[in-house]
Image (cartoon, rainbow, N blue to C red):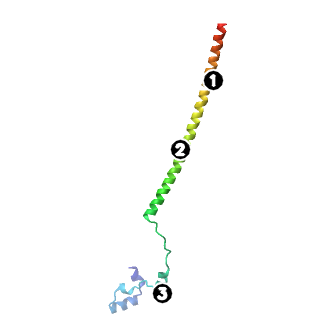
C-alpha cells in the first residue's frame, strides 16, 4: 500500500502499458562493488579460543582456591572462638582452685587450733 503511494501516477500508467507489475517498479536497496569490497576487507581480530580442558582446569583451580580461602577464614574464626572459650574455662578453673585452696587453709587452721 505504501509503495503505491510513493510511485508517481505517470510511472504506474507507463508500467501498466509495458506489462510490469508494481513490485518490479519499486527500486530495491543496492550497493556498489566498491562498498562491498571495503566492508569485506575489515577483519575482526582473531581471539584464541579457550579450550574445554584449559577452561575446566582454570575453573577448578579458581573454585578450589576460593573454597580453600573461605575454609581457611572459617577455621581461623572457629579457632579464635574455641581459644577464647578455653581461656575463659582456664580462668574459671583457676578461681575455683583458689577458692578451694582458701577453704582447705581455713579447715587446716581450725584443725590445728583444735589440737592445741
Disc 1 and disc 3 in contact, CB within 8 angstroms:
no
What is the secondary structure assignment of the residue under circle 1? helix
Q: Earlier in the sequence, mark 2 or mark 3?
A: 3
* Circle 3 crowding by C-alpha within 10 Å: few under 14, some 14–19, many from 20: few
Q: CA distance from mark 2 to mark 1?
A: 34 Å
Residue on which the image places disc 1: 98
Q: In the rendered view of the protein, which quadrant contains the C terminus?
A: top right
From this view, report whether residue 13 is shown above or below residue 87: below
Closer to the camera in the image, 31 or 23 = 31
Label 2 element class: helix
Give the label, 2 or 3, closer to the camera: 2
Mark 3 falls on what kind of element? helix
Q: Tags 2 and 1 in contact by the CB under 8 Å rule?
A: no
Percent from the top left, x then y, of residue 8?
42, 87
What residue is shown at x 49% (from left), y 53% (from top)?
Answer: 64
The residue at the point 61 percent across, 27 percent down is 94
Question: Which residue is nearer to you in this view: 98 or 29?
Answer: 98
x and y percentages locating residue 97 in the rendered image:
61, 24
Q: Nearer the viewer, mark 1 or mark 3?
A: 1
Q: On residue 34, which mark appears?
A: 3
Circle 2 sits on which residue?
Answer: 75
Q: Residues within 10 Å of mark 2 (few under 14, many from 20)?
A: few
Image spot of residue 28 (x, y percent): 41, 84
1 or 3: tag closer to the N-terminus: 3
Outermost residue, left side: 19
Q: Are marks 2 and 3 in contact (CB under 8 Å)?
A: no
Mark closer to the chain start, 2 or 1: 2
Q: CA distance from mark 1 to mark 3?
A: 101 Å
Residue 31, located in which quarter of the rendered image? bottom left
Amino acid at each position: 500500500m505504501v509503495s503505491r503511494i510513493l510511485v508517481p501516477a505517470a510511472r504506474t500508467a507507463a508500467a501498466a502499458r509495458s506489462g510490469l507489475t508494481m513490485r518490479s517498479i519499486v527500486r530495491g536497496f543496492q550497493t556498489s562493488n566498491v562498498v562491498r569490497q571495503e566492508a569485506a576487507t575489515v577483519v575482526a581480530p582473531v581471539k584464541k579460543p579457550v579450550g574445554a580442558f584449559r577452561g575446566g582446569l582454570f575453573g577448578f583451580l579458581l573454585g578450589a582456591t576460593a573454597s580453600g580461602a573461605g575454609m581457611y577464614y572459617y577455621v581461623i574464626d572457629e579457632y579464635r572462638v574455641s581459644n577464647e572459650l578455653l581461656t575463659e574455662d582456664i580462668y574459671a578453673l583457676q578461681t575455683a582452685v583458689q577458692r578451694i585452696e582458701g577453704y582447705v587453709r581455713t579447715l587446716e587452721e581450725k584443725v590445728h587450733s583444735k589440737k592445741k
